[in-house]
Image: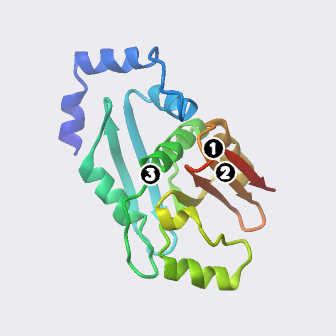
């Protein structure tokens, strides 16, 4: 992976990166993608799992193209850790996470608490808590629950909200933020 990144940073690649800052993003997710354009035309996701101990640090998008191998790695990482079931995780949620991380200006990795949830896992969690939605976007691979060392729940949620690209739930008492690519909405304290 490192070799391909170095070879993509040619004069042409650098010019594209600078030019990308002037391109108008599509109307949907414009704010999230606008933040990412300032990232040098590279999108990166850096996470670790508090449940499995696994770590993920991958560049999943370069110069307008998603990298299939990196997306497969993300799908595996975001799996339901209770059942090992996987789903194709929605790229929009991944982009919101990357844009929010960029805004937070940190090298720390997100801690993933929950990514994909199988219907079985969602039903079990729902039986234990009224705050778990019956038709949770977690079951569609469109939502994550995260923490970030060195950043408060308020800081993380403000970064995600500023992307204007999906739902953001602030769970201060439980110390996590929910981020999804569904309708733009905000909840929690």
Instruction: Give the residue at mark 1.
Output: 160
Q: Which x, y percent locates residue 185?
A: 70, 47
Instruction: Give the residue at mark 2.
Output: 168
Q: Residue at x 65, y 80 (%)?
A: 126
For mark 2, give the secondary structure.
strand
Q: Which x, y percent locates residue 48?
A: 46, 62
Instruction: Give the residue at mark 3.
Output: 46
Q: Which x, y percent locates residue 34?
A: 52, 27
Q: Residues within 10 Å of mark 3 (few under 14, many from 20)?
A: some
For residue 70, say whether it is visible: yes
In the rendered structure, are the residues bearing label 3 and label 2 in contact, judged by CB atoms less than 8 Å apart? no
Q: Quadrant of the N terminus?
A: top left
Marks 3 and 1 sit apart, C-alpha to C-alpha, by 16 Å
The mark nearer the N terminus, 2 or 1, is 1
The mark nearer the N terminus, 3 or 1, is 3
Marks 2 and 1 sit apart, C-alpha to C-alpha, by 7 Å
User: Where, by quadrant of the figure, is residue 63 drawn?
Assistant: top left
Q: Residues within 10 Å of mark 1 (few under 14, many from 20)?
A: many
Q: Residue at x 66, y 36 (%)?
A: 162
The mark nearer the N terminus, 3 or 2, is 3
For mark 3, give the secondary structure.
strand
Q: Residue at x 36, y 21 (%)?
A: 17
In the rendered structure, are the residues bearing label 2 and label 1 in contact, judged by CB atoms less than 8 Å apart? yes
């Amino acid at each position: 992976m490192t070799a391909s990144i170095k070879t993509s940073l040619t004069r042409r690649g650098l010019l594209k990166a600078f030019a990308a800052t002037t391109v108008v993003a599509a109307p949907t997710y414009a704010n999230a993608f606008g933040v990412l354009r300032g990232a040098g035309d590279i999108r990166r996701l850096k996470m670790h799992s508090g449940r499995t101990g696994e770590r993920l640090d991958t560049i999943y998008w370069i110069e307008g193209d998603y990298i299939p191998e990196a997306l497969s790695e993300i799908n595996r990482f975001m799996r339901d850790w209770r059942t090992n079931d996987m789903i194709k995780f929605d790229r929009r949620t991944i982009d919101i996470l990357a844009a929010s991380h960029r805004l937070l200006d940190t090298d720390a990795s997100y801690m993933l608490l929950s990514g994909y949830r199988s219907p079985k896992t969602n039903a079990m969690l729902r039986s234990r808590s009224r705050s778990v939605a019956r038709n949770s976007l977690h079951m569609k691979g469109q939502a994550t629950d995260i923490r970030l060392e060195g950043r408060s729940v308020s800081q993380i949620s403000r970064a995600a909200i500023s992307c204007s690209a999906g739902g953001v739930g602030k769970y201060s008492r439980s110390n996590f933020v929910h981020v999804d690519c569904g309708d733009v909405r905000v909840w929690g304290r």
